[in-house]
Amino acid sequence: MLSKEIQLEVNKGAMLPLMEEFYTIQGEGFHTGTAAYFIRIGGCDVGCHWCDVKESWNAELHPPTSVDLIVKNASKEADTVVVTGGEPLTWDMTVLTRELKNKNLKVHIETSGAYPLTGTWDWICLSPKKNKLPTQTVYDNAHELKVIIYNKHDFIFAEEQAELVNGNAILFLQPEWSKKEEMTPLIVEYVMNNPKWRVSLQTHKYLNIP
């Protein structure tokens, strides 16, 4: 149970439930292969059954950490920061993004879009989930739409989401890791037949890096 003072700081985004932070290579989507400092924020109620970081779901397991400390650590490494989760938009991202940008860092987010957009972002990767669809603010501002393909029905979902996202978003299909052997050939064929899409792979898992 958090004290009232800490809860107030969390509510306004001056403290956030930090799960982990690490410097690595971006493994998927548009910025694959580029160096980035990842900030993983705890807390998510979207509940994807194939989520590979279920330990991020319960925000109470991750201690509220001051944004000042998070920014200090991030600014020591790359010039690009990726905020991920969990679902980072569960929290107000205004303070974090402002302070990161004050350090002249490029600030990216990976989000399901399940909550309204807060913060100022250089790149928004929207990865929508069926059980809690994105808010309009995220559809309108996403730079990248990345749909995870777990089964054949997900191609239909991908096309539905492509109709809802803004027309400038770059479209990616990515096999769910446990289904990659089965789904990757289908994705390749689909992209060749529907070239508005691109293939995304979780290259960090092939490289055995975070």
Image: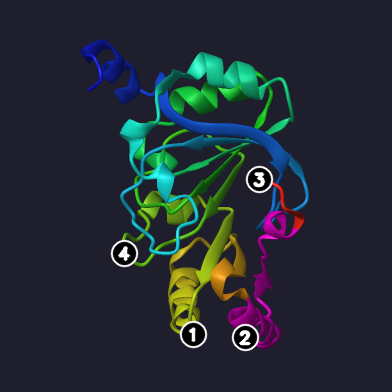
Which residue does the numbered mark 4 point to in the structure image? 131
Checking the image for residue 152, the label placed there is 1
Checking the image for residue 186, the label placed there is 2
Question: Considering depth in this image, is 37 or 193 the residue closer to the camera?
Answer: 37
Q: Nearer the viewer, mark 3 or mark 4?
A: 3
Question: Considering depth in this image, is 141 or 89 the residue closer to the camera?
Answer: 89
In what quadrant of the picture does the N terminus appear?
A: top left
Which residue does the numbered mark 3 point to in the structure image? 210
- Could you tell me how far apart the alpha carbons at marks 2 and 4 are, in whole angstroms? 23 Å
On the question of residue 176 being in view, the answer is no
Total of numbered circles in the picture?
4
Query: Residues at badges 2 and 1 in contact (C-beta under 8 Å)?
Result: yes
Which label's residue is closer to the chain start, 2 or 1? 1
Q: Residue at x 66, y 57 (%)?
A: 28
- Could you tell me how far apart the alpha carbons at marks 3 and 4 are, in whole angstroms? 27 Å
Q: Amino acid at mark 1?
A: Lys
Asked which secondary structure carries label 2, the reply is helix
Query: Where does the image place residue 110, in percent across and percent down from the top left?
Result: 53, 48
Query: Where does the image place residue 91, in percent across and percent down from the top left?
Result: 36, 34
